[in-house]
Amino acid sequence: MAKITYYTHDSKTHTIHVQNGLTVMEGAVQNDIPGIDADCGGGMACATCHVYVKEDWLDKLPTKEDGEEDMLDMAYEPKQNSRLSCQLIVSDELDGLEVTIPEKQA
Amino acid sequence: MNKTDVLIIGAGPTGLFCAHQLGIIGLQCEIVDNLDKAGGQCIELYPDKPIYDIPAVPECTGEELTNNLLQQIKPFNVKFHLNERVEELKKVENRWHVKTSGNQQFDVAAIIIAGGVGSFEPRKFPVKECEKFEGSSLFYSIKDKTIFKDKTISIFGGGDSALDWAIELSNTSKVNLIHRRDGFSGAESSVQKVKELNDQGKLNLYTKYQMDSVNGDNQISTVKIKHDDGEIKELQSDYVLGFFGLIMQLGPILNWGLNINKKTVEVNTENFETNVNGIFAIGDICSYPGKLKLILSGFHEGALAARGCFKYAKPDEKLRFEFTTTSKAAQERLGVKK
């Protein structure tokens, strides 16, 4: 279980506990946190679960697999701290993670 | 006006198998899809990725699955209308009149929406002013490349479309290729070619830059790009092209009076009819308690929706349940009766 904070574009803060093994994307979708579309359902094929990760977390996350950076090319306003939330699998190590959801996904 | 029993919206695996099920029970259908080929997400998002959960098919790619489904519906001579998006529906007595983006018209007894997560549309630039120039000096696809001759073109993106067009247009135009990072997702040979052209001065490559703004009156005159470190460059440009792949949008389906919840259409699980009589929804686009977004669920939903259409298409006949192994009628329709 990890406590994850999502900042949405309407300036709201959503802090929830997400079970280990789920993805940061699933944590948002299952808790009705707006702004994560996840059209492809976690297949790393659509870039609509794009989030900005708080800078000091970047090095602590699992590294990007082949293909994630390619998909991020397609994301809406990608930045240095962009990740696909479907690729971030929750574990105790992610306790306290903070992500910001972009203004929109497309 | 195309007159048929059922119109299927979406040529993904669910729509294709549903056409098979309609064919087996003796109903005619035609299929409309916004893409230029059948297969839906299977062909557009993951043609080469293996799928492992199609019953009785241990492993196949999205492309193989699509080809097999097309093979399976061959006996029914289903007519496809590709590159068309359904725009309008109108109820006329007990029939539906349907109009597409390309002005195709249909007169059908029932409609089955198998639209996945919506129709594929190009992803656009986040910069607001881009809308103003879209279609005149800013494009997301190329229909007539001759307009670019001897002009300056700024191309954004790092995939095959961006690289291929940068290479091709560099023969007859001044090309700037702008990409957000040093790595590219396009083919390695194209990346090498672009780098060579850049070294030879035949193309200008800007990496770690993204669009900051576009400027001009009726036509674009310059585009500003911003480096990761904040530096801004202004490039003279007659045209801007963006290649960021495709995104799925629900589009006009939202206006058809259907119960829509989180980009999905609510249906009953008896025959996958929506709240509007004669309109069915199957596959990823439908929702009901327990919905699984699997291809195999789409097949099941399509089989039931096809039978649900029967009473609208042939109100005076009764549908009898039959197996393809023994039904003479089904075998005749399949063209396999000995």
Image (cartoon, grey):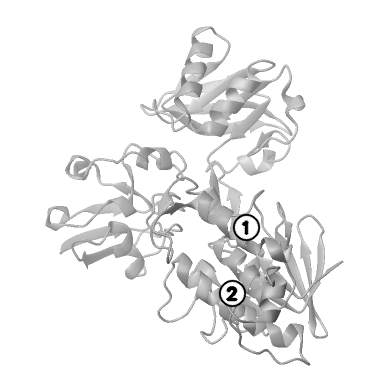
Q: Earlier in the sequence, mark 2 or mark 1?
A: 1
Q: Secondary structure at mark 1?
A: helix
Name the spot of residue A58 as percent of width and height, x first: 22, 41
Q: Chain of mark 2?
A: B
* Marking on residue B70: 1
Q: Is residue B139 visible?
A: yes
Q: Chain of mark 1?
A: B
Q: Nearer the viewer, residue A4 or B50?
A: B50
Q: Secondary structure at mark 2?
A: strand
Amino acid at circle 1: Leu
Q: Nearer the viewer, residue B38 or B260?
A: B38
Q: Split into 4 quadrants, where in the image is the N terminus of chain A? A: bottom left
The CA distance from mark 2 to mark 1 is 21 Å
Identity of the residue drawn at 47% across and 16% down: B195
* Marking on residue B281: 2
Residue B209 vs residue A4: left or right?
A: right
Q: Is residue B261 visible?
A: no
Within 10 Å of disc 2 (Cα), the crowding (few <14, some 14-19, many 20+) is many
* Marking on residue B38: none
Tally of numbered tags:
2
Give the farthest residue toward the top.
B200
